[in-house]
Image (cartoon, rainbow, N blue to C red):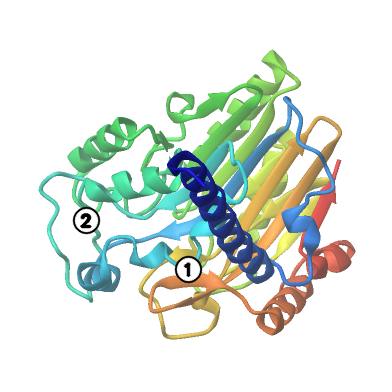
Amino acid sequence: MNKNEKFIVFVITGTLVIASVLFFFWSKVILVIKPELSTIVNPPITPTSISKRMLFVGDIMMARGVAQLTEKYGLEYPFLNITPLFYIFNWDIIYGNLEGPVRAEAKSVSLFSVRFDYSPAIPQLLAKLGFNLLNIANNHMADQGHSAIDSTRKYLEENHIFPLGDYSDCSLKYNYQKDNFVFLGANLVYKSKYCVQDLIQEIKELKTKDANLYVIVTPHWGAEYTSSPNDFQKQTAHQLIEAGADLIVGHHPHVAQGIEEYQEKLIFYSLGNFVFDMYFSQPVQQELALGFEWQPTQKTFYLFPLQSSKSQPSFMTAEEQTKFFDFLAQISTPSLTDQIKKGVIEAK
């Protein structure tokens, strides 16, 4: 056997070994993501050129205790156990709620501080993970003053992440539109009726201009640490859908809240935390990531239940998942029970 033949054999053998390792690794990843739901890995709908896939996660807070952990273990620490979630699907949009501002002069904050502060390294990391849409319409965006809101926009945009919404403004100026999708972000923590009316008017105007637009509203709202949406959330959600909203995905309560079907549209009242330094109860460490596959005649929602420990979310075990889905079904629209327990909801 000459040198060229030996080299070819070496390359082929090496390739087979690497392929075997990758197959073993990804098979384990798939098993962890959804032990009993092969449809998560092989969705019932075959993607086409007009299909869109989106991933939604809840509150991302990288200060206080999270910052102490990342200083010790590396900036990527919170995401190490769920990295496959970002890459196993070819997501068109990855969305999250950025709980705090970004600025060059960011400083460390104490464990008891409720004013967050992030360095430009944070949007760089989130962009690396695939985030391209972050909500900044929340009650922490002005923690370091209004100038920090402008710097947040600057650093997000430099990393090709669209900053959705504004701290105190529901104007169309800060909405995101791509193809036939429109995202409307709104800070409704303070139950502003004016903001709700602005949203209703915007939705109506958008639908009047183009009835085929798919309008997604992502409100920051609700009472903290409560698994049931309050009257303001429910009333507002219904008004937004009546105005023409197609999907509502909320956050702020720091716990997962129920899912409601209203006029054949879905309302995910709260996804709960995604990365946070809350450890005082089980609910604040049980999270929901939402996968959404859109096609003209079919909308499919994939529920990814996560269990966080020391600010590091992981995929739930089969037993944890069953208990979580049972609870989620109990606080959701009864007609959705079977689908929630399976981890997949289909809508028109």
Whether residue 193 is visible to the viewer of this picture, yes or no, is no
Against 40, residue 73 (above or below) is below
Q: Residue shown at 59%/41% (left/top)?
A: 91
Q: Is residue 138 left or right of residue 26?
A: left
**Element on which disc 2 rests:** loop
Label at residue 81: 1
Q: Residue shown at 78%/34% (left/top)?
A: 295
Against 75, residue 262 (above or below) is above
What is the quadrant of residue 276 in the picture?
A: bottom left
Q: Is residue 301 left or right of residue 140?
A: right
Q: Nearer the viewer, residue 10 or 242?
A: 10
Report x, y in % for residue 134: 43, 43
Which part of the image, by quadrant, shows the C terminus? top right
Q: What's the distance in space between the residues labelled 1 and 2, CA to CA?
A: 25 Å
Q: Residue furthest front?
A: 1
Q: Nearer the viewer, residue 235 or 294?
A: 294
Q: Residue shown at 76%/67% (left/top)?
A: 332
Label at residue 319: none
Report x, y in % for residue 308: 48, 75
- For disc 2, the neighbor class at 10 Å (few under 14, some 14 to 19, many from 20) is many
Against 306, residue 105 (above or below) is above
Q: Residue shown at 77%/52% (left/top)?
A: 42
- For disc 1, the neighbor class at 10 Å (few under 14, some 14 to 19, many from 20) is some
State yes or no: discs 1 and 2 in contact (Cβ < 8 Å).
no
Report x, y in % for residue 265: 78, 45
Q: Nearer the viewer, residue 4 or 284?
A: 4
Residue at numbered disc 2: 117
Name the N-terminal-most of marks 1 and 2.
1
Give, as a three-letter code, the residue at label 1.
Asn
**Element on which disc 1 rests:** loop
